[in-house]
Image: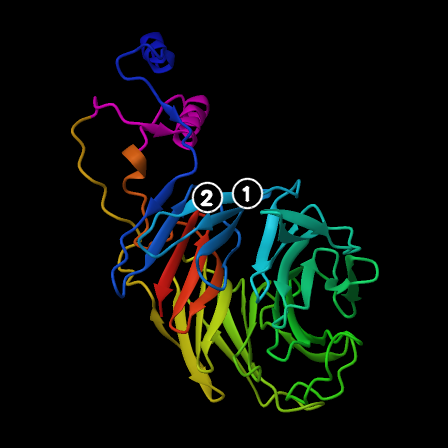
């Protein structure tokens, strides 16, 4: 490359300068049409987890080491940032809201969990005594809202409850036979059983019964005698792939999980002390799944690295992939035509750094496509779907690494 080319590249006074654009949080509402998804673009930072308040008027999302609260009046309104919760000093990995909507639960890689309650018009955090020495990875309120569970990289699940005499949240640990990082947890509808998936390819069902707090549970297919830490089931992914998502059916009589091998597993227990009546494995040609949700007893929706939701249907006889929520015919959108090479285009910081790296390694530069043209996926989410939540009986909400929260009809 000649010296004249280099000088024109690095001279910001040249006729075609490079603009490094660092935009603030971008809030883009999308018109809501019946049957069409509702999309909220909440900037471009990854959203690892999200949850709506029970009245659907407030949306809570994780953003790096903070948690943001947005006011959402209806599907056509622009989300308004109303509060930012700052209490963690490392990435917030999970967020959940108590069933009554009065408490927000967060956990982080800083090994802490916080319970946020609104006092005098603002949210105040209460530290939870987790007693873990590694990152907290996932947290979930129980259906009753009187306790919650926190999974961790410390190979334990902390079951936490409020101790009134000491005015703090304490925990009891589910330990054996856990031997790896807990990536996902799910409560059974009876408020006692807890399922957890981990990086050793196992899905386990424990009793999280707290004496003096929980009422004696009714017998289920998972068992009848349920003292704390009773192991009610232990199932293994066929390929020992990491388990990324786990969920109970609405009745609690079926357990499903997804793994890093892009498979869905569905377990039908037969009763206490008995082998399951059926364990169904569905292998997909999709990219790995990150989350799943029972829409009904016979329908599951899953999503992940494929950036599209997939619906599975079935019963104890077998399950199958029924459809993709979005029709995905092409992996990329056709790049729009441009006026010419001399036209000034705004370049993102990522593209600028990539261009400089090419110059350093190869001695030449390939001009990036303007505004990411030609690289857009044919799905709403442009990056991994990280979490799936129930929004209504016929709708789910998703959040992704692309900074979007989307409400889909299923």
Residue 84: give its label.
1
Identify the magenta region.
341-368
- For the view shown, which residue lies furthest in the front direction? 120
Q: Nearer the viewer, residue 117 or 79?
A: 117
Quarter location, residue 256: bottom right
**Does the stretch in magenta take in 365?**
yes
Q: How far apart are marks 2 and 1 (CA)?
A: 8 Å
Q: Residues within 10 Å of mark 1 (few under 14, many from 20)?
A: some
**Image point 35% across, 8% down: which residue?**
3
Label 1 near label 2: C-beta < 8 Å? yes
* Residue 299 picture location, percent across and down: 43, 78
Drawn side of residue 177 relative to residue 186, left or right: right
Quarter location, residue 272: bottom right
* Residue 370 picture location, percent across and down: 28, 33
**Image point 41% across, 53% down: which residue?**
72
**Does the stretch in magenta take in 219?**
no
Residue 347: give its label.
none
- The residue that disc 2 covers is 81
* Residue 24 picture location, percent across and down: 43, 33
Q: Which of 250 and 116 is in front in this view?
A: 116
Query: Under tag 1, what secondary structure?
Result: strand
Q: How is the image coloured?
A: rainbow
**Image point 83% across, 58% down: which residue?**
166
Q: Is residue 84 above or below residue 248?
A: above
Query: Under tag 2, what secondary structure?
Result: strand
């Amino acid at each position: 490359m000649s010296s004249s080319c280099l000088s024109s590249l690095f001279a910001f006074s040249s006729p075609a300068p490079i603009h490094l654009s660092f935009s603030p949080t971008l809030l883009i509402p999308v018109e809501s049409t019946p049957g069409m998804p509702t999309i909220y673009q909440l900037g471009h930072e990854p959203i690892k987890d999200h949850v709506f308040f029970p009245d659907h008027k407030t949306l809570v999302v994780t953003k790096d080491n903070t948690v943001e609260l947005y006011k959402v009046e209806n599907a056509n309104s622009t989300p308004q940032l109303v509060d930012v919760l700052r209490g963690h000093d490392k990435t917030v990995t999970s967020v959940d809201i108590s069933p009554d909507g009065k408490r927000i639960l967060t956990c982080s890689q800083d090994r802490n969990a916080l319970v946020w309650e609104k006092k005098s018009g603002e949210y105040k955090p209460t530290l939870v005594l987790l007693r873990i020495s590694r990152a907290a990875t996932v947290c979930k309120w129980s259906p009753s809202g009187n306790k919650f569970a926190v999974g961790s990289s410390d190979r334990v699940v902390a079951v936490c409850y409020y101790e009134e005499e000491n005015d703090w949240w304490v925990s009891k640990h589910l330990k054996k036979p856990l031997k790896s990082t807990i990536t996902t947890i799910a409560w059974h509808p009876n408020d006692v059983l807890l399922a957890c998936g981990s990086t050793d390819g196992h899905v386990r069902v424990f009793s999280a019964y707290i004496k003096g707090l929980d009422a004696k549970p009714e017998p289920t297919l998972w068992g009848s005698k349920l003292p704390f830490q009773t192991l009610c089931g232990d199932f293994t992914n066929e390929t020992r792939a990491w388990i990324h998502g786990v969920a109970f059916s609405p009745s609690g009589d079926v357990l499903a999980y997804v793994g890093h091998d892009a498979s869905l597993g569905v377990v039908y227990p037969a009763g206490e002390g008995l082998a399951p009546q059926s364990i169904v494995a569905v292998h997909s040609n999709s990219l790995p799944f990150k989350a799943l949700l029972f829409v009904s007893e016979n329908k599951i929706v899953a999503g992940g690295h494929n950036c599209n939701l997939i619906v599975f249907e079935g019963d104890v006889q077998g399950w199958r992939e029924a459809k993709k929520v979005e029709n995905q015919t092409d992996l990329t959108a056709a790049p729009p035509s441009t006026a010419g090479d001399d036209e000034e285009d705004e370049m993102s910081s990522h593209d600028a750094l990539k261009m400089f790296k090419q110059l350093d390694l190869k001695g030449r530069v390939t001009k990036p496509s303007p505004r990411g043209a030609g690289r857009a996926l044919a799905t709403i989410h442009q990056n991994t779907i990280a979490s799936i939540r129930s929004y209504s009986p016929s709708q789910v909400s998703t959040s992704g690494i692309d900074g979007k929260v989307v409400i889909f009809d299923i």
